[in-house]
Image (cartoon, grey):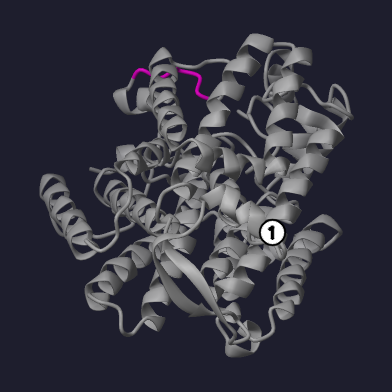
Amino acid sequence: MQQAGSKPLFKDSMSPPLAVLAYACGIAVLFFLDRDSSVHTSKALWVPVIWLWIVGSRAVSVWLGIAPVDTTNVQLDSPVDRFVYLVLLVAGLIVLVRRGGKAIGVLQANWPILSYGAFCLVSVVWSDFPGVALKRWIKATGDLVMVLIITTDADRKGALKRVLSRVGFILLPTSVLFIKYFPNLGRGFSPWDGTPWNTGVTTNKNLLGVIVLVLALGTLWRVLTLVRSKGQRNRGRHLLAQATALSFAVALLVLANSATSRACFVLGTVLMLATSLPAIRRRPRAVHALVLMMVLTAGLTMLFGGGAGIAHALRRKADLTGRTEIWDVLIPMAPNPVVGAGFESFWLGPRVDKVRNTFLGNPMNEAHNGYLEVYLNLGWIGVVLIAWIVISGYRRAAATFSRDPAFGSLLLSYVATAAVYNVTEAGFRMLCPNWIFLLFAVVAASGTVSGSKDVALRCFGPPTHSVARSFRADGAPWLRGTRV
């Protein structure tokens, strides 16, 4: 079963039906190997898992074959998708209401995110399509709701591990299955130049790249943690399951051919490996120099004249595959440089047709730069608020590293890769895995900033059940609750 005009990537060794059976059994084995009866997490975690299954693959209407024909027109939204997102959002809100003060405490500790969300809501007022913008704002709150469900669980780390496994064990192998045995589902053609690309469970290579990126970083964190935890019970089978998932992720990063996602994975990997060195762990201040050097080098080089060199190194055109041309056209089209067009409103109405006509009818619904995308929709105020979120997230993640180097390195990687990813892709958007995991990194690190003990208590409550002795990065003992 081969799509017209495309070359086979693999030599088929079994029929598609047999491949489905084999992959299904393999996925079941991964779940079996990764089971852990010692971790007690809420069943409510299935709500963000389902949310990420949809966000990280295709809308339900697309899976059912009833999506609008013009999927690049953001004004079109299937009633089926609206219903599914609404059900998940309501279910998530019910969970948070039942958790009461814990969820409120987390929100109170995250004023940058609340301020950004509030401004997005206010911006609906000056949108040319306020009804559409308001509906999208409501849907966008679902991303934060899902993050709060994970971070307010009794075992935050256990909750994150289970979410990563439940999402990764399904999406990663299934993407390989689609690409290898079902090219009509897992492969396609670029709408720009018609070249074939691999999409896996998503609808284009960049979407495949970003979901694999966030899952790969989380899986790498688990693998590194297991490698260092030599006395952990059932360590071998957990390591086998996570290493297998990581292998799928790395293979998909190659198959997706998304240069931005691959570069960000390398950045995140180097960051996690470097921060695992004893010299860095004993000197938390060295983390600042390491992170800033990596992020500034990547970001500033792309923005100020070095884009061609990076593009060539990544086997891309000197104009970052047309991105600089896109940016030159879009910047003057901002309706208001201070407040923008309104939340998710720039790509609505006549502007879409104008951009398409400029680029010879090629479909476009994003600026391919997260900071520019925010500027177009929310102006400079929105850009400042996004910068506030990223900077506060970095500070909190760095503070987490000083207390818990392994977990802190993951949060630092999510923040750093989000900052770099948005140089050439629009990742500060609702229902984007990059945005969701940036929110997670910021919220999960709440209360760890130096001198914020009261904030930590508001966010996660006093430790209960048991208290375990651990050690800071400098070797000093401290106490942490194992259950909340």
Q: Quadrant of the N terminus?
A: top left
**Residue 125 visible, this orientation:** yes
Quadrant in the rendering for residue 472: bottom right
Is 334 situated left or right of 207 in this image? right
At numbered mark 1, what does the secondary structure look like: helix, strand or loop? loop
Image spot of residue 79 (x, y percent)? 42, 13
Q: Which residue is mark 1?
A: 452
Q: Quadrant of the C terminus?
A: bottom left
Image spot of residue 260 (x, y percent)? 61, 56
Image spot of residue 289 (x, y percent)? 76, 75
**In the image, residue 430 above or below residue 322:** above
Is 6 situated left or right of 282 in this image? left
Q: Is residue 70 magenta?
A: yes
**In the image, residue 120 above or below residue 390:** above
The amino acid marked with disc number 1 is Ser
**In the image, residue 461 above or below residue 308:** above
Residue at point 73%, 43% (across, down): 112
Quadrant in the rendering for residue 284: bottom right
Residue at point 36%, 26% (across, down): 60
Boundaries of the magenta span: 66-71
Residue at point 24%, 78% (across, down): 236
Q: Residue furthest bottom?
A: 279
Instruction: Decide whether the magenta segment is chiefly helix, strand or loop.
Output: loop
